[in-house]
């Protein structure tokens, strides 16, 4: 007993000597002034725990190079206090890098990943193709969507090769209802079209990784990431959702769709309303349920006799509530590396969520992965297309299908489009059967309905 008392006394003495609180100062980069909230930095000098956080209120103003940032005093409970504060204000934190050989007064504060990604997003976001101008959008939205629209964020995924034509087609459903929280992402940025450059976003994400087992290209993006076209499409989902979350941090739901997908916003609002109250308390995510079919899982839907995990089909729409998005955001950098060999971005995203304890929980058959010209003539989908379920999305529509669907949506009005009525309209309009088009062998990965 006496030995333990003596040992405790010695340890306490060492803590008092080595852990003596002292005030330190860090200098900001030359001419750097934050655009919004005040920046406060804390240093736990004896434990290598260093962090910076963005505060909405309070803290210390960061100014030009002549001004300094006064740091709080280190303490045994500093890390816990910082984490509690970050949770309270719902902001992320990063560990600033210290330049080699720099003294305590030498290193510069650097922006967090969130702020750097926002700089990229704000460079492009807000500029849109003339056909997508909100001044042209209908004000006669459905009643439920009008109440929910400010708390739903939607990101549309496109690519350099197809963006100019696809962006015009998007106006077919965007003109029906107002979408205030909207973002467009691509493998190449375009200020004229308002396309956020995901190569730049991904570069900022990988800057925060201490090491990478993947070779970096000259622009700082890992080799084989965001190559453009179909190959680059797989790497848009994870950074795309992160950019959407940082741009609209208080949304209740985050949704990603492809640029050839038609969205029935009032119907979608009804689906989201069922889970509205859980948005901030219970992580939920989903969409149209498929079986993962990329490494390490077999493309046939089963691996070693066991059914592959479920993923949310990306083209027809992936839905994450706020709590799920909050859980996903810190996982994005590591998941971009871990699942880089997976050929599909929706599978990468789903695998990231699943393997980090976030199960697929929102099965939404109203989000349709194939166009009516394929499904209406298949017995597999007969039950769905003769039901009164309200359609949420339609993926891979041809120009003719898009025109018929858009006309019927405007004719019936928001909230009145179900599978059976749309099926009747399309067949009467002259819809013809089209053959399935598969770039990869995906047998068995579509769930039976």
Image: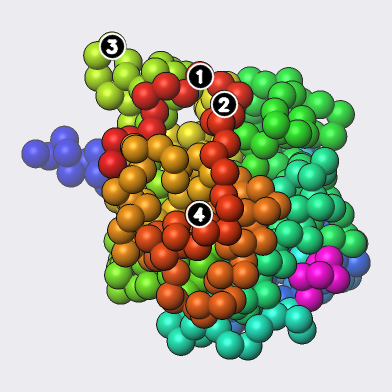
Q: Is disc 2 placed on a helix, strand or loop? A: loop
| Labels 1, 3: front one | 1
118 inside magenta stretch? no
| Labels 4, 1: front one | 4
First in residue order: circle 4 vs circle 3: 3
132 inside magenta stretch? yes
Region in magenta: 126-133
**Mark seen at residue 304:** 3
Please tell me which residue lies in front, 338 or 17.
338
Q: Quadrant of residue 311?
A: top left
Q: Is disc 4 placed on a helix, strand or loop? A: helix
Q: Residues within 10 Å of mark 2 (few under 14, many from 20)?
A: few
Q: Is disc 3 placed on a helix, strand or loop? A: loop
Kindly identify the residue that appears in the image at 68 percent across and 75 percent down: 175
Contact, mark 4 vs mark 3 (Cβ under 8 Å): no
Q: Which residue is mark 1?
A: 441
| Labels 2, 3: front one | 2
First in residue order: circle 2 vs circle 3: 3
Q: Which residue is mark 4?
A: 427
């Amino acid at each position: 007993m006496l030995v333990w008392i003596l040992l405790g006394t010695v340890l306490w003495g060492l803590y008092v000597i080595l852990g003596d609180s002292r005030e330190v100062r860090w200098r900001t980069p030359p001419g750097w002034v934050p655009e919004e909230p005040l920046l406060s930095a804390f240093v736990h000098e004896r434990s290598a725990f260093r962090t910076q956080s963005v505060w909405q209120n309070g803290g210390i103003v960061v100014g030009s190079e002549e001004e300094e940032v006064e740091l709080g005093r280190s303490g045994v409970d500093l890390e816990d206090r910082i984490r509690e504060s970050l949770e309270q204000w719902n902001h992320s934190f990063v560990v600033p890098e210290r330049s080699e050989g720099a003294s305590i007064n030498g290193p510069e504060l650097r922006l967090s990943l969130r702020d750097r990604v926002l700089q990229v997003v704000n460079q492009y976001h807000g500029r849109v193709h003339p056909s997508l101008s909100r001044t042209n959008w209908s004000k006669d939205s459905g009643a439920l969507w009008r109440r929910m629209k400010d708390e739903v964020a939607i990101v549309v995924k496109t690519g350099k090769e197809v963006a100019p034509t696809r962006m015009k087609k998007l106006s077919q459903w965007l003109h029906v209802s107002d979408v205030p929280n909207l973002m467009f992402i691509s493998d190449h940025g375009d200020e004229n079209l308002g396309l956020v450059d995901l190569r730049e976003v991904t570069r900022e994400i990988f800057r925060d990784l201490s090491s990478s087992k993947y070779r970096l290209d000259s622009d700082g993006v890992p080799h084989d990431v965001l190559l453009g076209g179909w190959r680059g499409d797989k790497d848009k989902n994870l950074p795309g959702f992160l950019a959407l979350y940082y741009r609209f941090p208080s949304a209740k739901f985050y949704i990603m769709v492809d640029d050839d997908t038609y969205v029935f916003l009032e119907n979608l609002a009804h689906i989201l309303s069922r889970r509205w109250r859980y948005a901030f308390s219970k992580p939920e995510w989903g969409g149209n349920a498929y079986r993962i079919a990329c490494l390490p899982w077999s493309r046939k839907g089963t691996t070693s006799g066991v059914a592959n995990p479920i993923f949310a089909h990306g083209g027809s729409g992936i839905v994450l509530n706020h709590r799920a998005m909050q859980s996903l955001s810190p996982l994005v950098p590591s998941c971009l590396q871990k699942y880089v060999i997976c050929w599909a971005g929706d599978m990468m995203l789903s695998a990231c969520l699943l393997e980090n304890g976030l199960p697929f929980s929102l099965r939404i058959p109203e989000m349709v992965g194939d166009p009516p010209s394929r499904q209406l003539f298949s017995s597999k989908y007969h039950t769905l297309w003769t039901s009164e379920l309200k359609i949420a999305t339609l993926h891979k529509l041809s120009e003719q299908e898009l025109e018929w669907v858009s006309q019927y949506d405007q004719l019936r009005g928001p909230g009145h489009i179900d599978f059976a009525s749309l099926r009747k309209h399309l067949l009467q309009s002259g819809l013809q059967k089209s053959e399935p088009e598969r770039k990869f062998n995906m047998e068995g990965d579509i769930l039976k309905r």
